[in-house]
Amino acid sequence: MKNTSAMVDPTLIYKRLLTYAALLLLAYIFLFPLIFMIMSSFKPEQQIFTDLFSLRALLPVGDISLKNYISVFEKSAIETMFVNSMFITGATVLLGLLVNSLAAFSLSRLRWKGQKFVLASIIALLIIPFEAISVPLLMLVAHLPWIGWENGQIILENSWLNSLHVQILPMVANTFSIFLFYQFFRDIPKDFDEAAAIDGATPWQIYWKVIVPMSGPVFATVAILQFLNMWNQYLWPIMVVQGESVRPLQPGIQQFFGTTTEWGEIMAYASMVTIPVLVVFLLFQKKFVRSMASAGVKG
Amino acid sequence: MADLKLNKVIKRFGEVQTIHGVDLDIKHGEFVVFVGPSGCGKSTLLRMIAGLETISDGEVIIDGLTVNDVSPSDRGIAMVFQSYALYPHMTVKENMSFGLRLAKRPKEEIEQRVGEAARILKLEPLLDRLPKQLSGGQRQRVAIGRTIVRNPKVFLFDEPLSNLDAELRVQMRVEISKLHEQLGNTMVYVTHDQVEAMTMADKIVVLRDGRVEQVGAPLELYHNPVNQFVAGFIGSPRMNFLNAQVLQMDGTKAQLQLSGGEQFSMTLDRPVKVGDVLLMGIRPEHLLIGEVGDVNISLNVDVVEALGGTTFAYTQYAGEDQVVVVADGSHIIPRGKTIEVSFKLDHVHLFDTSTAGSLLQQQKAPIVAKILSAA
Amino acid sequence: MMADSAFIQPPPATRVKKNDSLMRRQRFYGWLMGSPAFFGLILFIFVPFVMALILSFTDQRLLSPNPTEGVGLRNYDRLLAVSWLTQDAQRDEQSKLVLDEKGEPQFERLRKVLRQDPSYKGYSELSAITFSDSRVVLLAKDPIFIKSFINTIKFAFLVIPLQCGAALLLALLVNMGLKGTNFFRTAYFAPVVTSMVVVSIVWTFLYHKDIGLINEFLSSVSFGLIDKINWLGDPAWSMPAIVIMSAWQGAGYQMLIFLAGLQNISEDLYEAASLDGANSWQKFVNVTLPGLRNTTIFVIISTTIAAFGLFTQVDVMTSGGPADSTSTVMYHAVRKGFREQDIGYGSTISVVYFLVILAIAMGQKYYFDKREK
């Protein structure tokens, strides 16, 4: 939506030019580190340094190759970590969509005793930042039992540490997701539920066949937010995962960063971690932006 | 098939009671309209019949069986919502067959029942469309089609025409009436529009603040309203109310005087105190131009609305509230002048000011019976 | 007449029962559908929260064979205790001040002083203010925590105006709807989708004293006047470095929120202002800013809460240094609770952290609510 009278009157040519100059300068500021990162990933380290003090830093010129990328694959287990991240992110997002939307449905479309209390409690939990409970949560999961599978046998483990499930399960139930679903469901007229009830639908059927199909936007929003959140997670994985086999990408790149000073390779690793997200972002730009804005507004 | 009976039905929301003991007896095949101002409880009552609101006390009985604890889908009802509630992600056909699909009915049965409903409402060409591709009137018909597919004992309508523009509303009114003639099921229809009530109903239930004011055929309510509220609610433009003081009482015959000094006498249902001021009601359409009735009064004309076929005149009478006159368009009513109008005693309504109850109920009953038997 | 074929016959009419089976069904489904989420929230958020409170009163270690003991408020004391003492400068036999090579007065070794007095047990130096012939030494039992706390506040104070201000500026520019708006909005938002780890790594490179682009840019823009800043190595510049980078990464998200807020301001208000003769600046002050009030409040409060959780950048770029100048509350908690396995103490930090956040959020809300009156 255009708002022509926000700050300057753009019909004046010089004001318009000034605005464009500002926009472009800011765009440069916000983009150049990323462009630099991607471009450098294709250059040998020497060239990165020599290109630094000119515009060449941002251009794909010179000795361009995929050498750095190949090095990364050789020097680290990035494939494993990539798969880990994908699995963790995917599982958390999918489970989260189901679990949190069901909770929001129960809170907003059904009527039962204690509902208001539960809703108020959830909103209260919203205030607790993850950081505040990360340490005791660590303590908790370190002593939780789990039924595992190793060499074809079922074994009982006595801790959740160093596993995939410790990175997934605690993250599934999410107060902000529930909040977003709740706000959206509340705006759906109850008429639909009632018509379905007259048609003989159970609440479960109403959820699946009526509400979910009508809630595309909010499912997309929650999915995008959780995807970003999980893909970029750092604090929790470092706390609960030591070994490489279940480590996801973010701690992975941090470790890589700590063990080498080959900047070309570091940039390649960084690019591999970032480019999938950037691509998804560019493709679904409009949705992304709208999702995150509406999430913030509802907050 | 379906009788619908309400037995001292009460609704409470927490501490507040909103429906105060409603009794109703609806015969099979009747088209009953619940009408009343906003907040009178008509929708709540309908939803209690449907099972969408719990019944705090009393019983709702459909076809002889108490349905208080029965879930909506098992009561033998179907409902048309004000917003139609058509599932936006399903086609017309899917919308109409939803209930049957949930009940896992065999495919041929679904095809046959949906097809028949579509035929009755002329929806066949629209079966594969989505609701957003339909016009308001078409969506309405799909909503009705959905109810027909369910084969209910009682059809329920919750202000279905409110979302349509005026022209479409008139059209749909006729269609729903024709549907009733065709199907013959019991239908309960909620509206705040008394024109809809008067034109569609076999029986009207006038509600106010959770109580039934009067139940009767439209013409019965028109000619013999039981109290001032019903008298003022039914009929458009609204009935005029004037003060009439009791000068003398002779048994049940009263000598009354209007504010302008005009006098006439009427036989009441019961005697009243001399000196009491009663409320006289006279409908705008019963004020005749010229001195052709039983009582003549003079009115000062303020505003005239000439619509061609009819003319509305807004007038002042003897310093009282505005008096509205509806006359045939052929009369030319001058603005700012005084006109002489008169009315017949048969058209006079009298109400006790303390109870607002009609004092002429019994008197009017035979007249109404005659009108109804002729209709 | 249509035959009714599809109905289950309702149960025979009995006396009205009070328990409505419809209500019961809703209650059943209500709990059933909500239980996975409720269970998850209770187990993974509520329980740890309670655990933090309890553990803060113990000496629990992460994985230890020793039984846990309750230690009362010892952890809190260890965390929060501060004190101070004064020292006189050392003088020689003629009562003249003894000065060292730099001309600074000398003082008795602090450790000796502290060890001598049992009431100073557990304390170490936090910082000192030196006067000409005496000094005041601030002591704390956990000077790193105090420093971390101060750092965190410093970070918040710097990043909030920078990030929110930048976000507002971006939103205003983008909202003008000039051609290419989509491109600009995407550009400003790109850093937000990038992980903080990646951002930290790339900016570590950019912040390099000698070959970093930031110093290069500064020196070229000022024609060599601005010296090369040792961003990540100089305690004075390390926090600002993190502030700038964090604002860079986060501004885009706040920009979106401001954009939504701007678009909620009715065009009518601007037109009415024009008719009243207002110029652009006046419109901004009288229409835009008031209209953005609620949005701004939300942005500030959420940025504050996020700022207090500062961890990732610090862990990746500076490991809390140099000289603990970038250590934050959360970093300290992870270091103590996780890396040093002192869960009891780590929980104490978490509890204090939560209380501080709560106090700030409520304080800010109170402040803003009051201003509305």
Image: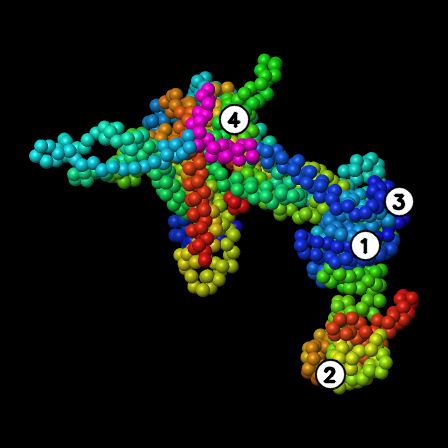
Residue positioned 59% across, 36% down in the render: C38
Question: Percent from the top left, x then y, of residue C369?
Answer: 46, 53
Q: Is residue C190 visible?
A: no
Quadrant including the C terminus of chain B: bottom right
Mark 2 or 3: in front is 2
Question: Percent from the top left, x then y, of residue C238?
Answer: 32, 34
* Residue A86: mark in rendering: none
Given the image, on which type of amino acid does mark 3 rest?
A: Ala
- Toward the top, the furthest residue is A151
The chain containing the residue under callout 2 comes to B
Q: Is residue B37 above or below residue C311?
A: below
Q: Quadrant of residue B202?
A: bottom right
Q: Quadrant of residue A214?
A: top right
Secondary structure under badge 4?
Answer: helix
Real-space CA distance between mark 2 and mark 4, rounded to the nearest whole angstrom:
89 Å
Q: Return the residue at label 3.
A: C3
Q: How many marks?
A: 4
Q: Dot 3: few (<14), some (14–19), or many (≥20) neighbours within 10 Å? A: few
Both labels 4 and 1 in a single chain: no
Real-space CA distance between mark 2 and mark 1, rounded to the nearest whole angstrom:
44 Å
Q: Dot 2: few (<14), some (14–19), or many (≥20) neighbours within 10 Å? A: some
* Residue B6: mark in rendering: 1
Q: Is residue C197 above or below residue A209?
A: above
Query: What's the magenta region?
Result: C42-70
Secondary structure under badge 3?
Answer: loop
Q: Is residue A114 visible?
A: yes
Given the image, on which type of amino acid does mark 2 rest?
A: Ser
Front-most of A102 and A208? A102
Residue positioned 42% across, 41% down in the render: C356
Q: Return the residue at label 4.
A: A141
Q: Return the residue at label 2.
A: B259
The chain containing the residue under callout 4 comes to A
